[in-house]
Image: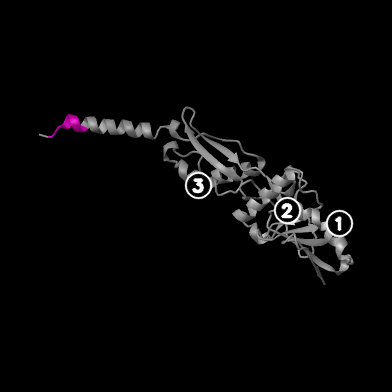
Amino acid sequence: MPDYLGIMAAMVMASCLWMIWTAHFWWIQNIEIRGSSPHTQAWLEQLVSAQNIKGQHVLRLNPLTLKDLAEQNPLVQTAQFERELLPTRLVIKVQERKAAYLILHEKKHYAYSVNASSVIDHEGVVLPLPASHAPKSLLQISADPGLLQTVLPTPNLDLLRQLETLQSQGRLQVDGVFNISNPQNLILHLNERNLKVWLGRAEDLPVKLQLIEASLKTAEKEQADIAYLDLRFWKHPVIKTR
């Protein structure tokens, strides 16, 4: 004979479970974003709106999927989506990337402007931030804009870090812009003289910088006649004339 009592008990239990599953307290009522600046706050709010998170069943959300979506923003280094009950809410915890360097865009005639520049973090990630958010620094750097699409390549970033270390040690006593587009040939554009100096690798850089004035004086050339000064092999400086 059929076990009617067992069947009824199973139906009652299923009904109870369904009522619990669909109870109002499971639906997300509030969304809280922590650790964001105005630059990411609006973007995350748009993400939440696009995913129709508010009003969804809290257990139907996939935090890993939301995390992947949030971290597509270059400013978001890490994001955590935590679900809480009573009250039911979603807490978004964000760690943002911090601006570390301002990279001027390489110009053919050296007409540098902060309006044509990129801001990157310590890992070389290009951040969608205005130049004013980069820390103030006496070290001026430029690079080919093609290198600044998403992440500055590692060799160029390593060169930048070398220059930063030398600058902090007070060993870059020069008024100019260092172009790091080619890590094998660092180029310095002297601001006052409007002159290009080929420096090659960063090894012995302080020595090469000290040779600039002496090399130019020895050449006895008019500044307008000099195309560039080549100090890649610093023991044998070369002045290229036009």
- 3 or 1: tag closer to the N-terminus: 3
Dot 3 falls on a residue whose secondary structure is helix
Q: How crowded is the residue under tag 3: few (<14 C-alpha within 10 Å), some, or many (20+)? A: few
Q: How crowded is the residue under tag 2: few (<14 C-alpha within 10 Å), some, or many (20+)? A: some
Quadrant in which residue 190 is drawn: bottom right
Dot 2 falls on a residue whose secondary structure is helix
The residue that mark 1 highlights is 192
Residue most extreme to the bottom: 242
Instruction: Report the amino acid beneath label 2.
Output: Leu
The residue that mark 2 highlights is 205
Q: Nearer the viewer, residue 30 or 75?
A: 75
Residue positioned 78% across, 46% down in the render: 138
Q: Give the vertical position of 191 relative to 21 (above or below).
A: below
Residue positioned 46% across, 39% down in the render: 56
The residue that mark 3 highlights is 68
- 2 or 3: tag closer to the N-terminus: 3
